[in-house]
Amino acid sequence: MKKSTLLGLAAAASALLGGIGVAHAEGSFTGNVALSSDYVFRGISQTEGGPAVSGGFDYTHGIFYAGTWASNVSSATISSGGIEMDVYAGVTPTLGPVSLNFGVIGYFYPGADDDGGPETDFYEGKASASYSPIEPLTLTGSIFYSPDWALETGDGLYWEIGGAYAVSDAFTLKASYGVQDADDYADSYENFLLGASYAYSGFTFGLTYTDTEDAFDLGYALDESDADEALTFSVSRAL
């Protein structure tokens, strides 16, 4: 999906929200920046196990949100010239105790050389629901769908279940399990995540363990080490 289409979606969503009476809420901008020892996406390293610098900006207005985020990536992994830029928009309504999130995400690789090869850019639609059965615990289920997933591999479907437990105001534990499937691959692959984060003096320090099942054997990762189990450390700050 081209950036103009995403911006059009954002404008349409903003108009819709005005029609249902939530646009009176004052909008706000926030930013974020992070340094991590690896950039892992759905269990697969996007930087060949190397460090990543990332950051983005978000705008919220009532239940509407839009934003952009960017990171360095490995040219060998993505064939992209080294940059990934994401653009997204959506809405976050509630249904009783359940928080919902419906949106669209575009993944763009400005430095990609697509001549004679598959298109690198792609987009996904997203739907997720979160529920807190007890105050410290949040459970989330999400599904992502793309009509033409990464590198033109046909319909792509990813679903994930996860949870986060706030041990204190500063310390949080999290875990997730997800499955990625695309038409042009023989089968789907699984990925797992366990992590913890600690907020201190305006910074958030994170440690995550990730692993995949059959991601390299099925062709989702170009290098076996990119899909191996890994520990990733990160430090981030909201702006």
Image: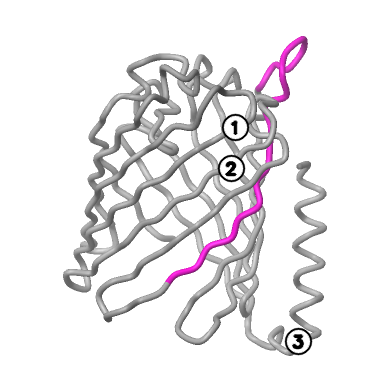
Q: Are marks 2 and 1 in contact (CB under 8 Å)?
A: yes
Q: Which residue position holds label 2?
A: 157
Q: Which of 211 and 87 is in front in this view?
A: 211
Q: Nearer the viewer, residue 212 or 199?
A: 212
Mark closer to the observer (1, 3): 1
- In reply to whether residue 6 is colored magenta, the answer given is no
Mark closer to the observer (3, 2): 2
Left or right of 62: which side holds 197?
left
Viewport quadrant of the C terminus: bottom left
Which secondary structure lies at badge 3? Answer: loop
- Disc 1 residue crowd, few under 14, some 14–19, many 20+, Cα 10 Å: many
Answer above or below: position of 98 versus 12: below
**In whole angstroms, how far apart are the C-alphas of marks 3 and 2?**
31 Å
- Disc 2 residue crowd, few under 14, some 14–19, many 20+, Cα 10 Å: many
Q: What stretch is highlighted in magenta?
A: 112-130
Amino acid found under the numbered disc labelled 2 = Leu
Disc 3 or 2, which lies upstream in sequence? 3
Identify the mark at residue 182; answer none if there is no mark. 1
**Percent of width and height locating residue 92:** 58, 72
Disc 2 or 1, which lies upstream in sequence? 2
What's the colour scheme?
one colour
Q: Residue at x 66, y 52 (%)?
A: 125
Amino acid found under the numbered disc labelled 1 = Ala
Disc 1 or 3, which lies upstream in sequence? 3
Which secondary structure lies at badge 2? Answer: strand
Q: In which quarter of the image is residue 138?
A: bottom left
**In whole angstroms, how far apart are the C-alphas of marks 2 and 1?**
6 Å
Identify the mark at residue 87; answer none if there is no mark. none
Q: Residue at x 68, y 36 (%)?
A: 155
Q: Which residue is drawn at 71% across and 35% down?
A: 148
**Percent of width and height locating residue 116:** 77, 9
Q: In which quarter of the image is residue 211?
A: top left
